[in-house]
Image: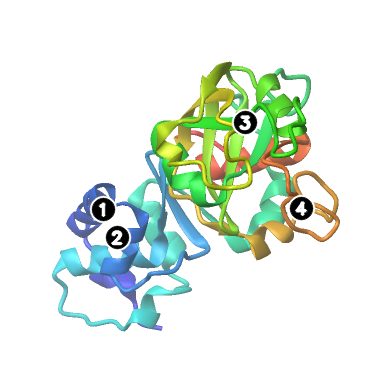
Amino acid sequence: MKRISLAISAFGIEAALTEARGLGRRAFGDKYGFPSASPMTLILDDRHLDVPALLASAHAHSESDLHFSHGDFVDNPEAPAILARFEQSSFDATNLKELVARTTPSGNFAADGGSTRYWWVNQGRHFRETAAGHHLWAANERADGHRGHKDWRALEEMLPGDVVFHHANGALRELSRVAKAAVPAPRPTERGPNTGPNTGHDEGLLVVVAALVRDIEIDLPLLQSFIQPGQAPFNRGSRPGGAYAAEMEPELAAPLATILAYGDSGENI
């Protein structure tokens, strides 16, 4: 394996971080030939970034005479040492089972005796719109006219300070905190016209959230490595349940939130 560490300068590292901040995870990864999420994740401010793309960017900005292939930036044994020079938290998502088991939640994510509750929300095609609008919303009634269904009740129970895991399209996408408790509200315009089975049911409850960590891409197989079948939010088939919102056990959710926000050190640097 080529010594990438010899080809990355302090300037290259700072330039890579600046570029990543400006582009965001997916555009940054695409630019350097890494369109898919990498398990090796760096936490920059409130965003997740892919380590191979960061290494490729830092090398490009270092103007080194040493040349590397796309594969040299993936699973490189020098990555941990180079990441230490970035002075940012990181974690390897392939080790999530071990990390969740040994991570002590930080003060921001109480697990035992705390008042914080943890919620998993399945958003699908509405994730981008609701993330942009910083809200969760559920109709008062289902298509069959049944009022007070479990999605509605879950939103009603959310309180400021609670933590929300946003799942969409087969992956965990964002971590947020409830900013304002539920209030009656019409269907948000960000969700577009109501053309689904709930057509005509446009009154509901709205919860305002504030993003804690964005650009998360933890896919289903990685989640299945440590969430047991039937353990909320999974059903017995080891997949997210059909409900829009479901409460999670703090013993599972608090360590996971800590890792997503602060890396495998579990500390907010």
Q: Residue 227 carries which label?
A: 4
For the point 30% across and 60% down, the residue is 27
Alpha carbon separation for disc pair 1 and 3: 35 Å
In which quadrant will I find the N terminus? Answer: bottom left
Q: For this view, does 52 lie left or right of residue 127? A: left
In which quadrant will I find the C terminus? Answer: top left
Residue 258 lies, in percent from the top left, at 59, 38
Tell me which label, 1 or 3, sits earlier in the chain: 1
Residue 97 lies, in percent from the top left, at 71, 56
Disc 1 and disc 4 in contact, CB within 8 angstroms:
no
Alpha carbon separation for disc pair 3 and 4: 29 Å
Tell me which label, 2 or 1, sits earlier in the chain: 1
Disc 2 and disc 1 in contact, CB within 8 angstroms:
yes
Alpha carbon separation for disc pair 1 and 4: 32 Å
- The residue indicated by pointer 2 is 28
- The residue indicated by pointer 3 is 139
